[in-house]
Image: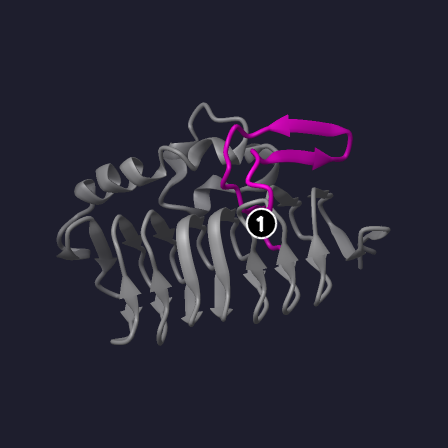
Amino acid sequence: MVTVQELFTLEHTIAASIFDGVTYPWEVLEPLSEFIKALGASLPAEEFLHPQEDVWIAKDAKVFPSAYIGGPCIVDHGAEIRHCAFIRGSAIVGKNAVVGNSTELKNVILFDNVHVPHYNYVGDSILGYKSHMGAGSITSNVKSDKTLVVIHGQGISLETHRKKVGAFLGDCVEVGCNSVLNPGSVIGRESQIYPLSRVRGVVPPKSIYKDPDHIVAKVEG
């Protein structure tokens, strides 16, 4: 439940090739910056603006004047970067994605149609196709004791060998308002996180997370 194949539909990101030969999503966090620079340099000039070094923005994307975009960064077709958004760099914003008011991104891949629209922090993380973070929800990417992040849960314990690891949201995940996803959280496809949650470890796909002791399977139909 924590592999790239289990979490993401790679047809829904311009960054699909970074996952070639990769088992776990946190493996792409280290090479992401250089990958963006190489990919950006290959993008067609008739489709993408290149307003500053290592920044490429699709001509049909909408970027509000008060937004800050630092490189390396790619903003794909139809994306919207709203007022006071802060993209610190090493970020890929997918097609038709929304980066909203006062949202901060750092070292992230947002797949197509991802929404982080209100006061979100997303760092050292990957958000799958159509995933959504409610207002005020954030990814915490550093443990308080600054030790390396380990992925725990569902009978696994996987070393990431990184001090900074945020969260990995599978396709169509919904995160409730003002929730905190602790370092190394993995949320399976189509799962929902209740508002005001403190999430740690692995949440299975198609689940509803109420609290650590109450994670229930979604009822189909």
Q: Can residue 114 be seen in this view?
A: no
- Is 113 one of the magenta-colored residues? no
- Identify the element where label 1 is drawn: loop
- The rendered magenta stretch, by its main secondary structure, is classed as loop
| Residue 208 x %, y % | 77, 56
Say if 164 sits above or below 77 in the image.
above
Q: Which of 172 and 66 is in front in this view?
A: 66
Quarter in which the N terminus is drawn: top right
Q: Mark 1 points at which residue?
A: 171
Q: Which of 117 and 103 is in front in this view?
A: 103
Residue extent of the magenta highlight: 144-173
Q: What residue type is labelled 1?
A: Asp
Q: In which quarter of the image is residue 188?
A: top right
202 vs 129, left or right, is: right
Residue at the top extreme, as displayed: 21
Q: Residues within 10 Å of mark 1 (few under 14, many from 20)?
A: many
Pinpoint residue 35: horizontal percent, then vertical percent: 30, 36
Check residue 164 for magenta coloring. Answer: yes
Regarding residue 150, the answer to whether it shows in the image is: yes
Q: Which residue is drawn at 50% across and 33% down?
A: 162
Q: Quadrant of residue 30?
A: top left
Q: Which residue is drawn at 49% across and 41% down?
A: 164
Q: Position of residue 145 (x, y in %)?
A: 60, 42
Give the residue drawn at x 35%, y 50%.
91
Residue found at the very far front of the displayed protein: 145
120, above or below 39, in the image: below
Residue 134 in picture, x, y percent from top left: 59, 68
Q: In this view, does 57 lie to the left or right of 109?
A: left
**Residue at 42 percent of width and 62 percent of height:** 104
